[in-house]
Image: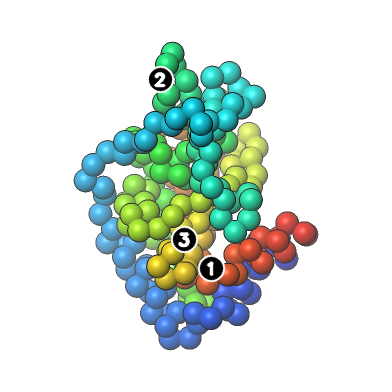
Amino acid sequence: MCLLSLLMVYVANGQNVGMDKVEADELLYNELKTALPPSNQIIPVLPSNRILKKTNEDNIYKVIGKSYQVESLRSDYYVRRKGDKYEILYDSRYPLESFVNLLMNKVSDNEHSILITHHQYGNVVKKLKMPMRNMFNLLARTMDVYCFVTAISNNKIEGVLVFHNPAKNLIHMFEVSTDTRVLVKGKSQIEANLYSNIPQDNIRSLFKEKQSK
């Protein structure tokens, strides 16, 4: 069973179902439609040596974050050292690291749009297209962000992006993909399947079952 099919099973069996789930999904959809861009440019916090891990690439370091529910779903991101300073890595020569940085909302000049297919409760499917920065401005202000890359080739890169709302004990999960060749070129489009308002406790079971396939 694919990840998306598993996800729908866990959502349907979760505790936040029925009219409450219907209303919550519709509310999120409407919030995304009207989300505004951030008022300030992203200014990433530069890392200290104690949270840097050297990669196999010259002058490329992983900034160690934390995992959520499963070890592969993390808040890490990547930087490049230039002299005694570090910069956020966003370079076509490093598609995996660049995609992670984009999903972790570390790219200050993000001009990408995201085409979202929102799978709501009751087999309702709605679509909307919006600037990625607007989506992050809505969700990342109050939620923790995690991601991991699930597949990469010369033509396509895929991943999972999760927003965790600790106050409500819920997550919003995006399965995302884009053309690897245009990832850091201009205003490309990210495609995403969104599954929202998932009870937090389901995520560990979901990924354990997926990884055992």
From the image, tell me which residue sits under label 1.
200
Q: Secondary structure at mark 3?
A: strand
Q: Label 2: few (<14), some or many (≥20) within 10 Å? A: few
Q: Position of residue 159 (x, y in %)?
A: 57, 48
**Circle nearer the N terminus (2, 3):** 2
Q: Quadrant of residue 105?
A: top left
Classify the position of the N terminus by image quarter: bottom right
Report which residue position mark 2 lands on: 85
Horizontal side, residue 47 vs residue 153: left or right? left
- Extreme-bottom residue of the structure: 19
Q: How many residues crowd mark 3 within 10 Å: few (<14), some (14–19), many (20+)?
A: many
Residue 164's x, y, as percent?
46, 60
Q: CA distance from mark 2 to mark 3?
A: 31 Å
Identity, as a three-letter code, of the amino acid under mark 1? Gln
Q: Position of residue 138 (x, y in %)?
A: 32, 57
What amino acid does circle 2 point to?
Lys
The answer to whether residue 117 is seen in the rendering is no
Q: Residue drawn at (27%, 61%), measured in percent from left and top? A: 34
Going from the N terminus, do you reach mark 3 or mark 1 first?
Answer: 3
Circles 3, 1 touching at the beta carbon (< 8 Å): yes
Residue placed at 41% from the left, 26% from the top? Answer: 87
